Amino acid sequence: MNGLWDQFQLLRPGWGDVLEIVIVAALFYRILILLQRTRAMQILLGVGLLGGGYFLARILELNLIRTLLETLFQYGAIAALVIFQPELRSALARLGQNRVLRIFTKLEGSAVVDEIVEAVEELVRTKTGAIIAIEGDVGLDEYARTGSRVQARVSSEMLTTIFTPNSPLHDGAVIISGDSIRAAGAILPLAQTPLQDKTLGTRHRAAVGLSEESDALVIVVSEETARISVASGGRLRVGIDLARLREILEGSLPDRSEKLSLATSPS
């Protein structure tokens, strides 16, 4: 009787077991949140299907299929590091960051926000295309090196001058770090996921691409429609007005309470 009771006692988790379960569950949840809306989630589902096929092959004693899958899994870890490289870098960069606080921590004071909003307003009025990347916790040095160093204080005049049509730097992106313009004419990575809205151009794809690779906030002004778009966390919000842009820059509203029009395709 005592032996049976001891076996049942093993099924009763202690506080340490409960803590471990909660930590592991939270970790898996965080990983899934980081992977959603990326090609990594689709690849992960494919790996899950292969794993299911492997166990099915073992049950049905399909030795050839089992051997092939075992060989595939043997070298799969190395292949995964190559395939998942962009997602791994992005996930490690974002891990542990607070979604509400990470967007605009580098900007020093409302004066910088005022200058950016004023510049965007002028760019919209003149239908001048522009892309402005605002550095978060993840450094943008590798992208700044693709453009021209500026090192100037953020001002609406400087931003509108950089994006003046036919100027040497108007085609690339401006990178802002803190209260300074670090670089102009920078080349940003294009989005890995297609944009649903086919009217969106290269600037929008670059904005989404950078937001997939880092925690940067990227503002785009369309020269065709004069619409303002904002990319962050791999999402593109299209048709933002100036008041909403200011709120996003100031970080006054949490992202999860918004009902946004997403231009990236769902996973």
Image (cartoon, helix red, strand yellow):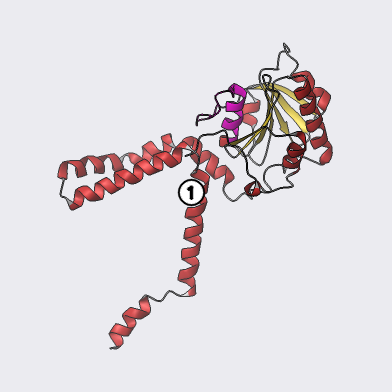
Q: Nearer the viewer, residue 219 or 142?
A: 219
Which region shows up in magenta? 190-211
Residue at point 66% right, 27% down? 144
Q: Nearer the viewer, residue 147 or 259?
A: 259
Asked whether 153 falls inside the magenta stretch, the response is no
Q: Quadrant of the N terminus?
A: bottom left
Q: How many marks?
A: 1
Q: Which residue is most to the top?
A: 166
List the single residue furthest toward the bottom: 1
Residue 184 drawn at (x, y percent) = 70, 22
Please determine whether, in this image, residue 191 is positioned above or below residue 251: above
Residue type indicated by callout 1: Leu
Binning the other alpha carbons within 10 Å of mark 1 as few (below 14), some (14 to 19) or many (20 upward) gives some
| Relative image position of residue 154 (x, y in whole percent) | 80, 30
Residue at 61 percent across and 37 percent down: it is: 261
Residue in the image at 25% along x and 42% along y: 69
Q: Is residue 237 left or right of residue 10?
A: right
Q: Which residue shows up at 54% across the image and 34% down it?
A: 264
* Secondary structure category for the residue under label 1: helix
Give the x, y percent position of residue 108.
Answer: 79, 41
**Residue highlighted by disc 1:** 32
Is residue 201 magenta-colored?
A: yes
Instruction: Please identify the quarter of the rendering in which residue 112 is found.
Output: top right
Q: Position of residue 191 (x, y in %)?
A: 54, 29
